[in-house]
Amino acid sequence: MFEVGEYVVYGNKGVCKIKSVGPINMPGISSERLYYTLTQVFLKGSTIFTPVDNIGTLRRILTKEEAKELIEDIKNIKPEWNRDDKARERYFTESLKMADSRELSKMLISLYHRKEERLADGKKATSTDERYFHAAEDILLGELSVALGKDRDEIRDYIGRSIV
C-alpha cells in the first residue's frame, strides 16, 4: 500500500502525489471502499481517485539511483519500428498506459529516429508520432525530474549529454 505524501506514476496521467487514503464521499460510491486521492504534480488543480484494491497502473517513481541508471542506459536502447500503423499505435497506447520508464525510453528513441529519417527524406514527422512522442516525454521527464530533484529542462539536457 502506498503512503500519503508518496510520489507515484499513475499510467498516462504521469507523476502524482498521494494526498490521502480512505473512503470518498460521492453519491453512488460505497463508503466501505478505500481510495487513493492523487494530485497530479505537473497539472495543478487536478485530482484523481483510484481504488486501493484496483491500482493496475499505479507504481512508485524511480529512486534517484534507478533514474540515473536509466539515463545512463538510454544510449544502449535500440529503436524499434513496427511498419503496421495499427499495431504500432496499440503498442504506443499500451506503453503510455503502463508508463514503464524503460518502455517509454524505447518509445521516445524509436519516435526520434523515425522523425530524423522522415526529415532526411524531406518529410515532416506525422502528427500522430508527435502526439505520442510528447505524451511519452511528458511522463518520463516528469518522473525523472521528481526522482532527481531537477526541473524537466535540466533532465532533457542531462539525457542529451549522456547519450552523446
Image (cartoon, grey):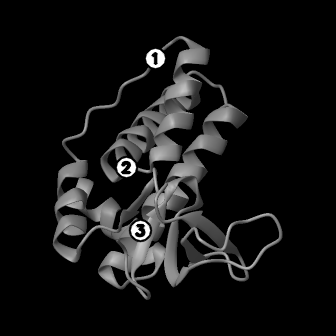
For the point 50% across and 80% down, which residue is it? 17
* Residue 164 appears in the rendering: no
Q: Name the secondary structure under disc 1.
A: loop
Amino acid carrying label 3: it is Glu
For the point 36% across and 47% down, which residue is it? 105
Q: Which residue is mark 3?
A: 143
Q: Which residue is mark 2?
A: 100
Occupied quadrant, residue 145: bottom left
First along the sequence among labels 1 and 2: 1
First along the sequence among labels 3 and 1: 1
Front residue of 78 and 140: 140
Q: Residue furthest right?
A: 27
Q: Name the secondary structure under disc 2.
A: loop
First along the sequence among labels 2 and 3: 2
Q: Position of residue 106 (x, y in %)?
A: 35, 40
Q: Name the secondary structure under disc 3.
A: helix
